[in-house]
Amino acid sequence: GQQVMQIPQYQHVQEGEDFTTYCNSSTTLSNIQWYKQRPGGHPVFLIQLVKSGEVKKQKRLTFQFGEAKKNSSLHITATQTTDVGTYFCAVTGSARQLTFGSGTQLTVLP
Amino acid sequence: DGGITQSPKYLFRKEGQNVTLSCEQNLNHDAMYWYRQDPGQGLRLIYYSQIVNDFQKGDIAEGYSVSREKKESFPLTVTSAQKNPTAFYLCASSISGSDTQYFGPGTRLTVL
């Protein structure tokens, strides 16, 4: 199945600093999704990117899909303690099953 | 109130026992999925089902079994053949034709 590499594995930031996580694939992706999992919780869908070069914003979160559709990023501006959690990218297989990246665990220090 | 329910939240079993994890959804979703998550790691697909009475193995199906007799239900059995069953198990569902998955709250299984 498709593989997607996600970096970094961990990120500690001071509240108010920015945060970015990256996903990379060796193959062209049909789309990419982003999920957030709060500590002790379950993944929650954030967004899906489909078009080459697509950029979508949700308040302080900016999602990008690369021009070649092989990479994606999630950027959070001015982090808050509510942003704490693990952020996963996920790619869709032929039967719509998801393959998840290993996740980036974000810690926000007050 | 629509959603996906998994019960119980925490489950303890002795080594060598089979255990069945429950997953129920009232979202009228056609597709359902089971994932396993180990501490500090991503989700790995165990089994998935796109329609009733049909299911496919995911990346780590060995030691697990499923059934899909009803659209609303997709129970997962962790058998004694699963060598390292202690993990967080997540069930998800999606609308036919959609890539977005909705997750249940999960069951934390500990095998002693």
Image (spheres, helix red, strand yellow):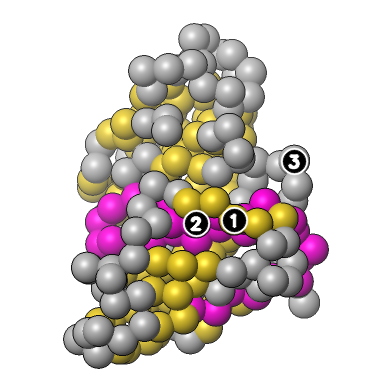
Mark 3 / mark 2, whichever is N-terminal: 2
Rendered position, A46 above or below A109 = above
Mark 3 or 2: in front is 2
Mark 2 or 1: in front is 1
Q: Are marks 2 and 1 in contact (CB under 8 Å)?
A: yes
Q: With A99 as the anchor, is A17 left or right in this view?
A: left
Judged from the image, the secondary structure of the residue bearing numbered disc 2 is strand
For the C terminus of chain B, give its image quadrant: bottom left
Judged from the image, the secondary structure of the residue bearing numbered disc 3 is loop
Find residue B41 and report its horizontal and vertical position in percent. 28, 53
Residue B108's quadrant in the figure? bottom left
Which residues fall within the magenta stretch?
B21-50
Name the residue nearer the viewer: A75 or B56.
B56
Q: Which mark is residue B97?
A: 3
For the N terminus of chain B, give its image quadrant: bottom right
Q: Which residue is mark 1?
A: B55
Between the C-alphas of marks 2 and 1, the distance is 7 Å
Between the C-alphas of marks 3 and 1, the distance is 16 Å
Exactly how many numbered labels are in the figure? 3
Task: Decide: few, some or many residues near mark 2? Use Cα within 10 Å; few <14, some 14-19, many ≥20.
Answer: many
